[in-house]
């Protein structure tokens, strides 16, 4: 479970923070980050974090989502929204894919209790995931959601599927949600390295006058092609170096 990071964005309720710590301890998780901490009532959080109080002493407190996921190879935002270019995965698919991406680190990002992740934060994530729920009550408590994703990763780690399931058979994405992610072994480029590639691509497209005004989704859509290829750190550096060298050779 060491390659999974839980990221909470603007959590406001101390009971939720304590319950998240307890859920993490249930499944041997200890890597978590909190972006824009919305409460400092850790006494209340401790009363809920049964046998997980020590986790409350060491979350990584971050000012931005960028900071929280910079060293992660895959960033999954929890949201029911559909966004062009991003896979929408069920929790069990996230667990299987996080396992396949080891030793790269996966971050699962949870928004604040009332409004979830903003559009900009969703755009910042590589892919999205949502828990199928009933229409009468579609939202889950923050700690419940963390518990479910932790369970699915634990289930993926336990090995062979139960009797009656075909070995190696994974969930099939729903129609229109794209193919299952391609597997790749070995070290993967971190989010910070992929952001550097995207910035180099943006500079090149501006220098070449491809971007005449606002970029809208062009740069992100093109950069997502590189992300989906899961480049290694060396490949990401090569992409960035090549793009910046070409940019320097352009007139002006």
Image (spheres, helix red, strand yellow):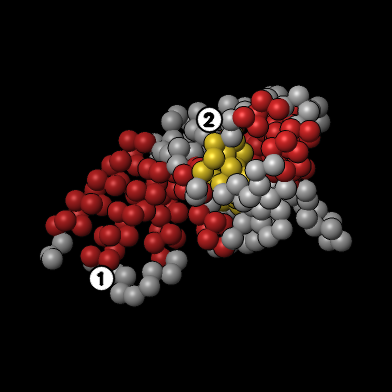
Which residue sits at x=68%, y=60%? 115
The Cα–Cα distance between marks 2 and 1, rounded to whole angstroms, is 39 Å
Q: The C terminus lies in which quarter of the figure?
A: bottom left
Q: Is residue 121 visible?
A: yes
Measuring from the top left, give residue 18's x and y in whole percent: 73, 37
Measuring from the top left, give residue 72's x and y in whole percent: 49, 38
Q: Residues within 10 Å of mark 2 (few under 14, many from 20)?
A: some
Tell me if 174 is positioned left or right of 199 in this view. right
In the picture shown, does residue 220 fall above or below 26?
below
Write down the residue under mark 2: 102
Which residue sits at x=78%, y=55%? 139
Front residue of 196 and 58: 58
Measuring from the top left, give residue 69's x and y in whole percent: 50, 42
Write down the residue under mark 1: 209
Tell me if 221 is positioned left or right of 52 in this view. left
Measuring from the top left, give residue 107's x and y in whole percent: 56, 40
Front residue of 130 and 137: 137
Q: Earlier in the sequence, mark 2 or mark 1?
A: 2
Tell me if 244 is positioned left or right of 152 in this view. left
- Helix, strand, or loop for circle 1? loop
Which residue sits at x=70%, y=33%? 21
Specify the label residue 177 is tagged with. none
Which residue sits at x=43%, y=69%? 216
């Amino acid at each position: 479970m060491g390659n999974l990071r839980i990221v909470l964005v603007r959590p406001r309720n101390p009971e939720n923070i304590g319950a998240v710590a307890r859920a993490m301890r249930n499944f041997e998780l200890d890597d978590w980050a909190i972006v824009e901490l919305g409460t400092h009532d850790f006494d209340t959080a401790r009363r809920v974090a049964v046998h997980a109080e020590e986790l409350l002493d060491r979350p990584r407190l971050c000012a931005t989502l960028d900071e929280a996921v910079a060293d992660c190879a895959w960033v999954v935002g929890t949201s029911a929204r559909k966004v062009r270019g991003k896979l929408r995965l069920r929790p069990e698919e996230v667990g299987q894919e996080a396992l396949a991406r080891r030793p790269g680190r996966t971050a699962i990002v949870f928004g604040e209790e009332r409004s979830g992740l903003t559009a900009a934060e969703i755009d910042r994530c590589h892919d999205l995931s949502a828990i199928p729920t009933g229409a009468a009550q579609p939202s889950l408590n923050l700690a419940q959601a963390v518990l479910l994703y932790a369970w699915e990763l634990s289930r993926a780690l336990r090995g062979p599927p139960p009797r009656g399931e075909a070995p190696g058979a994974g969930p099939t994405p729903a129609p229109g949600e794209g193919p299952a992610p391609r597997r790749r072994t070995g070290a993967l480029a971190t989010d910070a390295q992929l952001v550097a590639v995207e910035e180099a691509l943006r500079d090149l497209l501006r220098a070449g006058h491809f971007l005449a005004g606002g970029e809208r989704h062009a740069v992100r859509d093109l950069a997502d092609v590189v992300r989906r290829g899961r480049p290694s750190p060396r490949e990401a550096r090569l992409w960035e170096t090549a793009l910046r060298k070409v940019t320097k050779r352009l007139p002006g």
